[in-house]
């Protein structure tokens, strides 16, 4: 707990020139060796050559680098400054509404062009691709947050961008597709007739709604089969988490300025990138100083990879084309129910997050979606900003922790990541108000079935 009196400010801003110029790489400080990714066919550790058809060499190097800090290239910094540093806010009105003794701070990543944290890595990935001569990027997107972030980043560095968007979202969530078009990307509903993977699914099921796993297979096939194209992934991988640490590096400066270091750091987790981006710099401080900071990852109970999954080797996609990585997983064939937090519907978890969970440094909790929207509305009515359904999972956990603190007579400092705004998710809020949201928890039998098969 902090010794100084906390500052009275509501909004703690950094000047542009105070923006950190290095990403933090936790591979330098891990108290355990990372488990190597394995080749999908041979099950032997993979080398850089195996990844070269899909990623530029600089990103492959970052994936395994043990340098503690990595300089952010100047052109990436220049783009970051379009919206960074992002604000850190003290949620005073929420504290009052909860009558809590806890101090609640949040880092707000919704001010980026795409409305979430995802451009932090999209811009970096587009830059390294451009620098190594890539002409075209391929990727998949579910609800469209990642696709819109990559479309923006590709435009900035004048790359073509091909996006395979899960068909059901393509039809039901048209506005993120519109954003991708504004930024000049090509978007096709997946499964598409453009790839062998897509054609095969369409033959089996002409009405397939698609899934993230199918779209990943299409985007990977696209990149692997074209000389001018590389593949881009928006979460899970070490280099993605690395790029997101700009969030936590800024937050560290802002919390110091606020005179209040966090006792608890909270974030929602899909693949784990926004949570890690905020948390990992504070994990470094815990490992260094022995500070008893807690780290809490919040997942949906419809896709509870950490709280109910198994820590083992599994594929990143549903077809089994990607390397095997050691992570908390519900099995690569698992298709989560279509909850409104589309960005949290993933069967696995970032290996770095999984390793830190396994070593007792990160805790996790899972929530059903109705209670998550209840928290989101409470937050919006106190603080104004309407959270993305994904980010609202973090809000739910923070409110519960703040109420618990009041009941225990404690006054912890809580810091959480508001990873994006919900202005393109208002249909989900409508459904919540109309009483049409369903909670879709996984039954214990289904979990036994999924995890037993691993
Ligand atoms: C994609 C997304 C997430 C989930 O992805 P992570 O890699 O776990 O961060 C969370 N919040 C928002 C707003 C997103 O767009």
Image: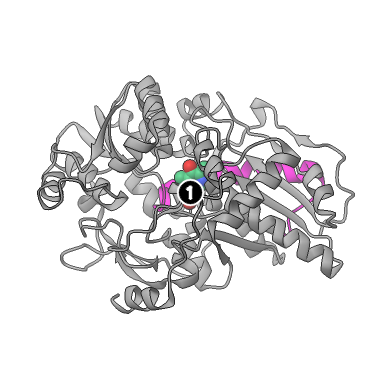
Residue 193 seen:
yes
Residue 199 at x, y = what percent?
11, 44
User: 420 above or below 317?
Assistant: above
User: 241 above or below 186?
Assistant: below
Colour convention of the picture: one colour
Residue 305 at x, y = what percent?
44, 65
Residue 164 at x, y = what percent?
27, 38
User: Which picture quadrant has residue 16?
Assistant: top right
User: 19 above or below 394?
Assistant: above
Cβ at disc 1 under 8 Å from ligand 1: yes
The residue stretch that appears in magenta: 235-263
Residue 273 seen:
no
Of residues 258 and 397, which is closer to you in this image? 397
Residue annotated with mark 1: 341
| x 32%, y 67%: residue | 331
| x 56%, y 59%: residue | 298
Of the 4 image quadrants, the one containing the N terminus is bottom right
Of the 4 image quadrants, the one containing the C terminus is bottom left
Q: Is residue 373 left or right of residue 174?
A: right
Of residues 379 and 70, which is closer to you in this image? 379
250 in the magenta segment: yes
| x 11%, y 49%: residue | 200
1 in the magenta segment: no
């Amino acid at each position: 707990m902090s010794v100084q009196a906390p500052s009275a400010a509501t909004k703690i801003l950094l000047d542009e020139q105070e923006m950190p110029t290095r990403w933090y790489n936790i591979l330098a400080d891990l108290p355990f060796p990372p488990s190597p990714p394995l080749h999908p066919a041979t099950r032997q550790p993979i080398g850089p050559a195996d990844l070269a058809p899909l990623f530029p060499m600089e990103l492959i190097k970052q994936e395994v680098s043990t340098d503690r800090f990595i300089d952010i290239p100047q052109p990436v910094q220049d783009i970051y400054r379009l919206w960074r540093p992002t604000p850190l806010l003290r949620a005073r009105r929420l504290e009052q509404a909860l009558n809590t003794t806890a101090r609640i701070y949040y880092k707000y990543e919704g001010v980026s062009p795409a409305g979430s944290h995802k451009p932090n890595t999209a811009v970096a990935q587009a830059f390294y691709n451009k620098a190594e001569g890539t002409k075209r990027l391929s990727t998949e997107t579910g609800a469209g947050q990642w696709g819109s972030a990559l479309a923006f980043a590709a435009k900035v560095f004048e790359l073509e961008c091909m996006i395979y968007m899960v068909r059901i979202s393509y039809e039901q969530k048209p506005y993120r597709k519109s954003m991708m078009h504004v930024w000049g990307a090509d978007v096709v509903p997946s499964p598409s007739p453009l790839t062998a993977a897509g054609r095969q699914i369409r033959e089996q099921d002409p009405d397939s709604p698609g899934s993230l796993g199918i779209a990943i297979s299409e985007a990977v096939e696209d990149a692997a089969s074209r000389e001018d194209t590389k593949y881009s992934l928006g979460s899970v991988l070490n280099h993605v988490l690395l790029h997101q640490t700009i969030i936590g590096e800024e937050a560290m400066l802002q919390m110091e300025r606020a005179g209040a270091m966090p006792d608890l750091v909270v974030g929602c987790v899909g693949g784990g990138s926004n949570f890690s981006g905020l948390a990992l710099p504070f994990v470094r401080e815990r490992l260094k100083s022995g500070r008893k900071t807690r780290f809490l990852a919040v997942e949906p109970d419809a896709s509870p990879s950490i709280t109910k999954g198994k820590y083992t080797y599994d594929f990143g996609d549903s077809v089994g084309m990607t390397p095997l990585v050691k992570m908390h997983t519900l099995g690569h064939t698992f298709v989560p129910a279509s909850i409104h937090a589309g960005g949290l519907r993933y069967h696995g978890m970032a290996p770095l997050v999984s390793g830190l969970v396994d070593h007792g440094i990160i805790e996790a909790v899972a929530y059903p979606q109705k209670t998550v929207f209840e928290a989101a509305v409470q937050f919006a009515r106190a603080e104004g900003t309407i959270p993305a359904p994904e980010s609202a999972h973090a809000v739910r956990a923070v409110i519960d922790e703040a109420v618990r603190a009041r009941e225990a007579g404690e006054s912890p400092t809580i810091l959480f990541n508001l990873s994006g705004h919900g202005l393109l998710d208002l249909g989900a809020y409508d459904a919540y108000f109309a009483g049409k949201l369903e909670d879709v928890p996984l039954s214990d039998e289904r979990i036994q079935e999924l995890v037993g098969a691993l």
